[in-house]
Image: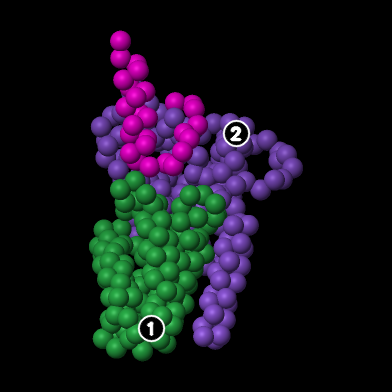
Chain colours: A green, B purple
Amino acid sequence: MRRRQTIAILALAGLFVALYLWLHKIGLIGELQCGTGSCEIVQASRYADLLGFPVALYGVIGYAVIFAAALVSVQPRWLAARGPGLALVALSSLGFAFTVYLTAVSLLLIHATCRWCLASGAIMTTIWLLSLATARRPT
Amino acid sequence: MKGFYAALAVVCVAGGAWLFYASRHRASEHAPATGPAPVVTDTFPGYEMGSASAPVTIVEYSDFECPYCAAFATVQMPEVRSQLIATGKVRWRFRDFPLHPHSTLAAMSAQCGGEQGKFWEMHDQLFDHHQWAQQDKDPSGIFREFGKAVGLDLSRYDACMDSRRYDNRITASQQEGVALGVHGTPTFLVNGRRFEGRPTSDAMKALVDSLIAARKP
């Protein structure tokens, strides 16, 4: 249960990171607080949109769905069931694959990194690893 | 479970507070509201590239310290150069519109590079290596390194920077922009009309192509 709770907390944190990037993308938030990174370059690149929608929006939706699934999975009636664990594995695997793609694009095609994107990548990777562990042993 | 829900609440409060704080910041780089400055005259039109007979002229009001300008210069501008300028469709003109603490110094550095025929090389250095804009210390030494990297005669560059002889040119450029209704960077005037929307190379190409098509009988 601890792992699923951790997944829920991480997914909520990731949801806020993705929301921050998405709200910036649609102009509701000013300059990204990026420190030494190159967030504006990454966000202004052609790869910041996918199929007509901002990549960050996919992040918002993905984290929201994972958060909801994790929240359901920690309820007493679902604790012993394998379904929620498998759902978390499936969802986070999708998220992790997307993270790998975005990180590769950032490093190999844009040649710039965005610390918020890297933070989101780290969160999603941790969620994925925890979900794998949860699927093996759901406690 | 109480600890779990408390942790969720903490994340919610922290995330919400961060988003609220971020939303209070400006959505783009805007000129500060100041009183009228003395009018400075300078006849220099700005550095240009592209064919003089190009059917479309795009004037860019830019600030070397502005992150949006750097993003445009590094991501969109290479496409603009290859698709619009190199093809003879567009003549591009760069105008300074400094808004940040080190913007004028950077503009002056580019102008001093231009004095030696290397304006666009300095322009690219200033935008490609934009880390200088993300630190508080005086970037003069970094700009000098850029000058060295593009092959400037550094003694002439130093003399140029010390003399501040392009102060008036930069101020005049900004005042010209304000008179034309520019209030943030980057701003683009396409054949004299402000470019609206996200400045992507694709959007600019679509606009330029439509303007050229409209000229044909």
Q: Residues within 10 Å of mark 1 (few under 14, many from 20)?
A: some
User: Mark 1: which secondary structure?
Assistant: loop
The residue identified by callout 2 is B181
Q: Residue at x 60, y 47 (%)?
A: B30
Which chain is home to disc 2? B
**B182 left or right of B90?**
right
Q: Which quarter of the figure has residue A29?
A: bottom right
- Chain letter of disc 1 in the image: A
Is residue B195 in the magenta section?
yes
Q: Quadrant of residue A122?
A: bottom left
Neighbours of disc 2 within 10 Å: few (<14), some (14-19), many (20+): few
Vertical side of B10 occupied by A114: above or below = above
Badge nearest the viewer, 2 or 1: 1
The one nearer the camera, B101 or B116, is: B101
B8 lies above or below B144: below
Q: Quadrant of the C terminus of chain A?
A: bottom left
Residue B121: percent from the left, percent from the top?
Answer: 36, 50
Extent of the magenta region: B191-217
Q: Is residue B16 magenta?
A: no
> Which one is nearer the viewer's eye here, B34 or A122?
A122
Mark 2 residue element: loop
Q: Residue B113 location, x and y as percent?
A: 42, 49
Residue, x 41% and y 56% (percent of image)? A57
- Taking the image as shown, residue B75 lies to the left or right of residue B178, namely left
Residue B24: percent from left, percent from top = 63, 57
Q: CA distance from mark 2 to mark 1?
A: 62 Å
Q: Which residue is mark 1?
A: A79
- The kind of residue on which mark 2 rests is Gly
Q: Is residue B12 visible?
A: yes
Q: Are marks 2 and 1 in contact (CB under 8 Å)?
A: no
